[in-house]
Amino acid sequence: MDRKEIEKKVRDFMVEDLEIDEVKITDDALLKKDLGIDSLDFIDIVVIVEKNFGVKIKAEEMAGVTTFSKFCDYLEQKLSA
């Protein structure tokens, strides 16, 4: 799966499942501040990512993941491992 596909899938589930306004989802959008993702949303994200991408998210690995772009970087790295 290439970067564009990862970004599209992430954008799609953020809009559909988390009900985030698509115009807010930019590369440098902060997950918590700009997109309003809270700890309950994070649990949903873990389940959705496991279902759609087949990878497990570990909280300690997500410590420095603060933006949409960094989240996609994280997934890209997990998928290529």
Image (tube, helix red, strand yellow):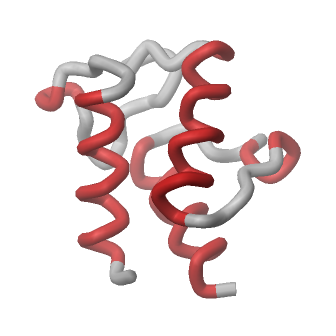
Where in the figure is residue 43, as x and y percent of width and height? 66, 26
Q: Is residue 33 left or right of residue 43?
A: left
* Residue sitting at x 25%, y 35%: 25
- Above or below, comparing residue 49 to residue 54 in the picture: above
Q: Quadrant of the N terminus?
A: bottom left
Where in the figure is residue 24, as x and y percent of width and height? 21, 26
Where in the figure is residue 9, as x and y percent of width and height? 31, 55
- Name the image quarter holding residue 5: bottom left
Q: Is residue 48 left or right of residue 4?
A: right
- Above or below, comparing residue 77 to residue 67 in the picture: below
* Residue sitting at x 51%, y 64%: 53
- Name the image quarter holding residue 34: top left
The residue lying furthest to the right in this view is 60
Q: Quadrant of the C terminus?
A: bottom right
- Above or below, comparing residue 12 to residue 17 in the picture: below
* Residue sitting at x 77%, y 41%: 63
State the count of labels. 0
The residue lying furthest to the left in this view is 23
- Above or below, comparing residue 9 to residue 80 in the picture: above
Asked whether 36 or 47 is in front, the reply is: 47
Q: Is residue 8 left or right of residue 57?
A: left
Where in the figure is residue 64, as x and y percent of width and height? 71, 45
The residue lying furthest to the front in this view is 51
Asked whether 46 or 62 is in front, the reply is: 46
